[in-house]
Structure formats: C-alpha cells, structure tokens
Image (cartoon, helix red, strand yellow):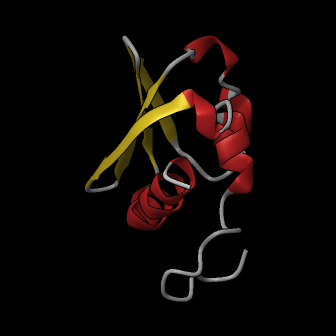
C-alpha cells in the first residue's frame, strides 16, 4: 500500500476494518506505542488470520478489548480506524 500522505489514509487499511467486523463493530480505538487497541461489540466475528495477514504481529484479546501489536504503523492505523468509526 502507498505511504500515507497527511490525513489521506482513507484507503489504507480496509482489509483490517473488515477483519475487525466492520466499523459498526468498533466502539472505540486507542493507541499507545506500537499497539492499537479496539473495543469491540462482538469479538466472535473477528477474523484473526485476516488481521495477521495485514502485517499485525500479535493479537491479544481480553474481555471486550482486542489489542494489536503493529509497530511503527500504530498511529496511522489508529487514525484510519478512528476516522472510519466517526464517519
């Protein structure tokens, strides 16, 4: 995928969004360091293999939160997902 240009990242991670169950399944997104955490309405519809195919190294699931270790792209992924759920 192309490097993000400013805020123009609308098409950067559509596969990741689908793998998380779509924007309607995401309640909240946060990021800290190399991790992006999402609070999901339904964890059972998440496709972990598909998430990993997007370059996510590790997925940690606890209660309603799913945390992805994504490295340097964490802020870009956070902004993308956050923008999607606020459209």
- Residue 78 is left or right of residue 54, and the answer is left
The image quarter in which residue 13 lies = bottom right
Q: Nearer the viewer, residue 28 or 19?
A: 28
Q: Residue furthest front?
A: 87
At x 44%, y 63%, the residue is 79
Residue 86 rendering spot, x and y as whole percentages: 49, 52
Q: Nearer the viewer, residue 57 or 4?
A: 4
The image quarter in which residue 63 lies = top left
On-image quarter of the C terminus = bottom right
Count of labels in the image: 0
Residue 46 rendering spot, x and y as whole percentages: 65, 24
- Residue 48 is left or right of residue 83, and the answer is right
- Residue 31 is left or right of residue 1, and the answer is left
Residue 65 rendering spot, x and y as whole percentages: 38, 24
At x 59%, y 74%, the residue is 9
The relative height of residue 38 versus residue 78 in the rendered view (above or below) is above
Q: Residue furthest left?
A: 32
The relative height of residue 41 versus residue 78 in the rendered view (above or below) is above
At x 58%, y 28%, the residue is 25
At x 71%, y 68%, the residue is 11
On-image quarter of the N terminus = bottom right
Residue 2 rendering spot, x and y as whole percentages: 69, 81
């Amino acid at each position: 995928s192309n490097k993000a240009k400013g805020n123009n990242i609308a098409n950067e991670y559509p596969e990741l969004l689908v793998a998380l169950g779509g924007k309607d399944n995401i309640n909240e997104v946060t990021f800290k360091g190399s991790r992006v955490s999402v609070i999901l309405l339904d964890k059972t519809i998440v496709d972990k293999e598909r998430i990993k195919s997007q370059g996510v190294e590790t997925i940690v699931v606890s209660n309603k939160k799913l945390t992805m270790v994504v490295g340097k792209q964490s802020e870009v992924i956070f902004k993308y997902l956050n923008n999607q759920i606020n459209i």
